Image: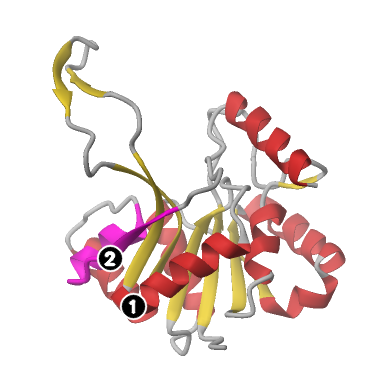
Amino acid sequence: MNRDAGAILLAAGQGRRLGHDKSITEIAGRPVFAHPMEALLASPEIALVVLTVRRDVKEEARGWVDVNFAKDKHRVKVIEGGKERQDSVWQGLEALGEWMEWAVVHDAARVLTTRGLTEKVLAEARLHGAAAAASKMSDTVRATDACGRILRLVDREGLWRMETPQVVRSSVLRRGLELAKKNQTLVTDCLAAAELAGVKGVLVESGEPNLKITVPGDWMLSEAWLRMRK
């Protein structure tokens, strides 16, 4: 079993649409970040998890980890995240160190992720250099103008909704983020950074609930799923 992967758990977002810092707010009895952290720590392939949070909740998050993940606390680093997502990923890479071959990047707001999904994406990344969880589009898709007037029907064949975890070879992700910074390019996911570095990854059908908490309705659905799993 390879143990050459480190995870970056992104929880430094402001949660503006929810009206509170979602990373430390409890859902199903635990802080949001705790649910995906448990899934990441469950994998023996992941040597270290770096949790990125806002500065004002860093000590609170560290304290929670020390008490509630006591046997694995040596495998967790809690750091201050950056202004943009790619800044937090970069800081996570720095915290993992250059010896870590693979970076597993996950949004803490996707509380339903599992060890199985993480390891499935990691296995595909080992084969192709980069991989990400995603879901095939099943809804009808239409393009509109800025006022919502329909312009055309979009063929959904080959269209996917991007999710996390996303896994990229650390050196490739680092190079892609360096190029993004140099070119003043905003990359919204890690596969985009990998493409800047010349590596095209593959998408892995998540095949299980993996929604991202963005609005209050997402919160209720995610909590219902978490409680059902228990």
Q: Which residue is mark 1?
A: 127
Element at label 2? loop
Q: Is residue 27 magenta?
A: no
Which one is in front, 137 or 13? Answer: 137
Distance from disc 1 to disc 2, alpha carbons, whole Å, reads 10 Å
Image position of 150 (left or right of 135) = left
Q: Please name the residue shown 24% across and 12% down the image.
A: 148
Q: Please name the residue shown 57% across and 88% down the image.
A: 1
Could you say which quadrant of the image residue 123 lies in?
bottom left
Q: Please name the residue shown 61% across and 58% down the image.
A: 114
Which of the two discs, 1 and 2, labels the residue nearer the N terminus?
Answer: 1
Element at label 1? helix
Q: Residues within 10 Å of mark 2 (few under 14, many from 20)?
A: many
Could you say which quadrant of the image residue 49 lies in?
bottom right
Is residue 131 in view from this perspective? yes
Residue type marked 2: Gly
Q: Which residue is mark 2?
A: 201
Q: What is the magenta range?
A: 189-205
Is residue 91 in view from this perspective? no
- Residue 25: x and y in percent read 73, 41
Residue lying furthest left: 151
- Residue 226: x and y in percent read 72, 42
Residue type marked 1: Leu
| Position above or below: 194 against 150 | below
